[in-house]
């Protein structure tokens, strides 16, 4: 066991989502108790103000100063902890030096990135070194992609128990969700759009469903992708594209590959939003598809992007109100079909706003799971993992017990 004084350090504790996460850790685990954790960031003044706003309960919460652009400060921070959580994004702009510092020092790491092109670069550049030092890196520990990745993992465990085999096709459909966007998420979305406009190779890479799978993984299936309004027979309803599908599907395929193709070499997975039945459902699906298309087009055109950033979208540090976070929720439905034609239905639900109220809890529990439930690197080696492939059932147990998530079997036949 490492001699580091802390189990967890929250880097970016003053970010919109970092504050939610830090409040969650304080409420659930206290400060200076069984879980030894600290808050970190670039601005001492901001961290101290945030800490004093947390009240007496945070009196024993240590503060670490580290800057994403200062390697020495990041290394010093990593040496003080077993796990670093980072909410400093856009990750493609600020995230690499910290991943490098964690990998070099053998420190475990988790974050909230949904920037698939950046994840691929990090794997390419640092996986070999992470295997040597024992650092376990787990990206995508928020709404993208924990519910999808662990939702598929859960469905496949049920399928194996009921049918003796995994499902070769799984679909996730967003039945309902209520939540908002923060400035950090908007900045990340705009940044990836800007990068894609400037680079045709990146556009090709973003279209590849296996882009973050290991190079030696040989998938044997062309993936379906819901790109427009589509009727779904399995749900007897219309569907529209789901904006997070572009990252979630990639994470789920990497999970399959890292578990030795546990879902099958011919595994197919797609995501979409359910918009209802009949003409109303069709009109809603067309509306969602057009709205998403419109946003992406606007984000690629400089003046429209400027107007979006200036007048419409939240700025860095801004996001949904506490009331909106409290009132938010999500309800995701999964259907799986085995090669023999058996069908299974499951659902994953969560309380609070998916991207913030719930994401803060998911990220906190992923880090706690990494720090306390996962074997040492001798048994679970360093490398770039996914939530399902490294944390699996242990994370599901924690999320259900502590974080307002539920994983349920609805039907199998
Ligand atoms: N996967 C999901 O479900 C999900 C959900 C929510 C958010 N996210 C992602 O999480 C990230 C954070 O989002 P947010 O809305 O919380 O962002 P935010 O409020 O804009 O905060 C960004 C943070 O980065 C820090 N920062 C910037 N440059 C830094 C540097 N050089 N050194 C140290 N810290 C630096 C800022 O520090 P200061 O506080 O000192 O300014 C701030 O704390 C984004 O990438 C977003 O896309 C993902």
Image (cartoon, rainbow, N blue to C red):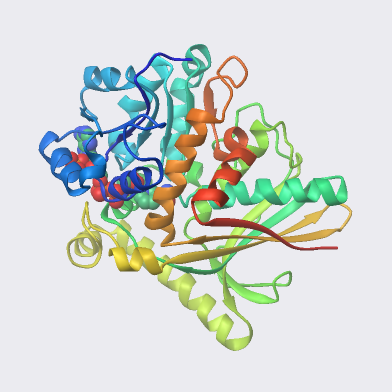
Front one among 162 and 213: 162
Question: Which residue is rendered at x = 40% and y = 13% of the image?
Answer: 3
Residue 336 in picture, x, y percent from top left:
74, 57
Seen in the image, is 226 located left or right of residue 37? right
Residue 270 in picture, x, y percent from top left:
63, 56
Seen in the image, is 403 located left or right of residue 13? right
Task: Pick out the residue farthest to the left.
Answer: 45
Seen in the image, is 6 located left or right of residue 288? left
Task: Say whether residue 191 is visible.
Answer: no
Task: Pick out the residue farthest to the bottom.
Answer: 279
User: Where on the picture, by quarter, is residue 82?
Assistant: top left
Front one among 74 and 62: 62
User: Where on the picture, by quarter, is residue 265?
Assistant: top right
As displayed, is residue 411 above or below residue 11? below
As displayed, is residue 119 above or below residue 350? above
Front one among 333 and 208: 333
Question: Which residue is rendered at x = 47% and y = 20% of the image?
Answer: 135
Question: Which residue is rendered at x = 79% and y = 46% of the image?
Answer: 166
Residue 122 in picture, x, y percent from top left:
43, 28
As displayed, is residue 224 above or below residue 113? below
Residue 128 in picture, x, y percent from top left:
51, 16
User: Where on the picture, by quarter, is residue 272?
Assistant: bottom right
């Amino acid at each position: 066991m490492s001699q580091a004084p802390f189990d967890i350090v929250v880097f970016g504790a003053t970010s919109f989502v970092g504050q939610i996460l830090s409040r969650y850790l304080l409420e659930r685990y206290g400060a200076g108790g069984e879980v030894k954790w600290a808050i970190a960031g670039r601005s001492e003044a901001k961290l101290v103000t945030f800490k004093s706003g947390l009240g007496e309960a945070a009196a024993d919460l240590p503060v670490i100063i580290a800057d994403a652009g200062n390697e020495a400060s990041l290394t010093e921070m990593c040496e003080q902890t077993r796990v670093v959580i980072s909410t400093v994004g856009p990750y493609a702009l600020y995230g690499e030096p910290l991943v490098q510092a964690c990998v070099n020092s053998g420190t475990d790491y988790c974050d909230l990135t949904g920037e698939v092109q950046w994840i691929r670069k990090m794997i390419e550049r640092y996986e070999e070194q992470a295997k040597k030092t024992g650092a376990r890196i787990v990206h995508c520990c928020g709404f993208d992609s924990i519910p999808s990745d662990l939702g598929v993992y859960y469905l496949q465990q049920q399928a194996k128990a009921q049918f003796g085999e995994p499902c070769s096709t799984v679909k996730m459909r967003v039945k309902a969700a209520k939540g908002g966007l923060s400035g950090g998420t908007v900045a990340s979305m705009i940044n990836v759009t800007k990068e894609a406009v400037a680079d045709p190779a990146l556009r090709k890479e973003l279209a590849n469903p296996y882009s973050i799978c290991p190079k030696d993984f040989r998938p044997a299936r062309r993936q379906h992708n819901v790109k427009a309004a589509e009727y779904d027979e399995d749900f007897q309803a219309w569907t529209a594209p789901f904006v997070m599908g572009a990252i979630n599907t990639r994470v789920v395929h990497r999970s399959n590959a890292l578990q030795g193709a546990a879902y099958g070499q011919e595994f197919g997975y797609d995501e979409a939003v359910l918009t209802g039945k009949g003409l109303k459902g069709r009109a809603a699906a067309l509306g969602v598809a057009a709205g998403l298309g419109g946003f992406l087009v606007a984000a690629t055109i400089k003046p429209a992007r400027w107007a979006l950033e200036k007048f419409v979208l939240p700025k860095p540090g801004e996001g949904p109100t506490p009331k909106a976070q409290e009132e938010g929720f999500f309800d995701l439905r999964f259907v799986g079909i085995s090669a023999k034609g058996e069908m299974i239905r499951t659902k994953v639900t969560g309380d609070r706003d998916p991207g913030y109220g719930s994401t803060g809890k998911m990220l906190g529990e992923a880090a706690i799971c990494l720090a306390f439930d996962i074997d040492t690197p001798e048994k679970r080696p360093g490398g770039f993992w996914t939530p399902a492939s490294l944390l699996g059932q242990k994370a599901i147990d924690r999320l259900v017990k502590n974080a307002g998530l539920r994983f349920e079997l609805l039907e199998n036949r």
